[in-house]
Amino acid sequence: MSEFRFPENFVWGAATAAYQIEGAAHDDGRGPSIWDTFSRTPGKVHRGHTGDVACDHYHRYADDVALMSELGLRAYRFSVAWPRIQPDGTGPVNPRGLDFYDRLTDALLDRGIDPIVTLYHWDLPQSLQDRGGWTNRDTAEHLADYAVAVHHRLGDRIRTWTTLNEPWCSAYLGYGNGVHAPGERDAGAAFAAVHHLLLGHGLAARALRAAGARTLGITLNPADVQPADPDSAADRAAVRLVDGLHNRIFLDPLTGAGYPDDVLEHVSRLVAPTFVRDGDEKTIAAPIDLLGVNYYAPTYVAGRPDGAGGGGAYPGTEGAVEFLPPTGPLTDSGWMIEAAGLTRLLERIDRDYPGLPLMITENGGAFPDRAGADGPVVDSDRIAYLDGHLRAAHRAIARGVDLRGYLVWSLLDNFEWAEGYRKRFGIVHVDYLTQRRTPKSSARWYQEVISRNGL
């Protein structure tokens, strides 16, 4: 049997997000977030589920860190809840909120686990949303102030800082088609949010660098966009359009090239981009040391005059692009399983944006697994998914891609946004009634992968 060994010092870990696992929604001065509001809006989240309790990680973090250590994790990517630090989004810092992340950081370091911080994973303080949220330029400035406040407390121990997680989701799903918080449906608002999220990243990165942060990055969910028919000019044009709205609108300005002309032309057909001011693109291009890549499934498109388009997730594609339904094996979320898409995506980023170290910051799948009465969850489908994608990552490394690590999504079953608690991504099963943690077969499999540094 062939063996796939990963580079020495390759980072193995897992990832989570604050609102999805912490719970303690009203503890120690935490203010409300847009997800608290959204999840209480009838019809927005499956069965009205909320993150009020989630996995109760806020109170059970020590046991969760011990479990990470047992599994051999070398790194843990977690997000800080902005509403815990500044309940109103601005102004005085809440020390009790920072105390929690202080305790979590020390617990991780005591176990030899490297903490990787994400400053913003979608839980905007509701008070900022009341003032326009990411459509308001001021929110970008507030993000930078918040970032400095967190770094002031934790910067002596945390090396790797990530500003944003998946701004594509925050902008398009939050403001374009409304399936995520804050639930708006406005193409102009979506594009304004894209720009202000990127501006906030640039301002925060600049402020963190000045404060002494060592490794700075941002996490995107770039899409592997493929044509339904590679020989079709119309399908290739559809790929170009969707790639522009999903990938290049973020990657180009982040790496100093500014917004692509064809993307700006498309945006201008829908809204006057007056929110882009002189000097903004220079700010957005603040140097970064690492790009986080979240990958789950490929995207296949066709250029068709009667295409259904992206329904707001890709504003302006209606009547021009058809997004093909997934085929072949699917996850419980209905997402297509195609590990080769990860190899293509990593190679494409490495080719088009050279010199940018990469880390897979999320990769995993939801599957309908359940805990047995006396034993672990046997989640063979998840193991097969992870195995295939790790082999795809290894293939990219063998072809010269500078990939530094892999963080599985997710450590724990958790609140899966609009899906509530009905989709399970964790390698550790969580009984939401008792909060009992049970490592699944995939957790023990991943433990062995880490121990041998390969497959």
Image: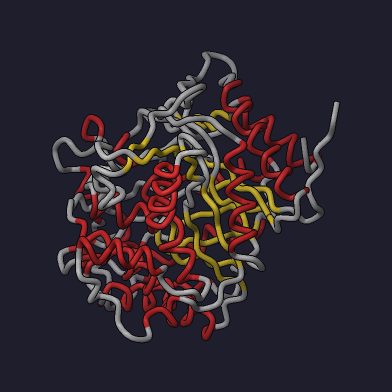
Q: Which residue sits at x=48%, y=19%? A: 370
* 4 on left or right of 377: right
Residue 27: horizontal and vertical position, in percent?
A: 31, 55
Q: Is residue 229 above or below residue 372?
A: below
Q: Nearer the viewer, residue 164 or 391?
A: 391
Q: Nearer the viewer, residue 223 or 143?
A: 223
Q: Is residue 371 above or below residue 260?
A: above
Q: Residue furthest top?
A: 373
* 195 on left or right of 343: left
Q: Is residue 159 above or below residue 440?
A: below
In the rendered image, which quarter is residue 262 located in? bottom left
Residue 49: horizontal and vertical position, in percent?
A: 26, 35
Residue 259: horizontal and vertical position, in percent?
A: 40, 70
Instruction: State the quadrant of the N terminus.
Output: top right
Q: Which residue sits at x=37%, y=56%? A: 245
Q: Nearer the viewer, residue 219 or 150?
A: 219
Residue 59 visible somewhere in the drawing: no
Residue 387: horizontal and vertical position, in percent?
A: 67, 32
* 352 on left or right of 21: right
In the rendered image, which quarter is residue 321 located in? top left
- Tell how many labels: 0
In the rendered image, which quarter is residue 403 located in? bottom right
Instruction: State the quadrant of the C terminus.
Output: top right
Q: Which residue sits at x=32%, y=78%? A: 141
Q: Nearer the viewer, residue 116 or 270?
A: 270
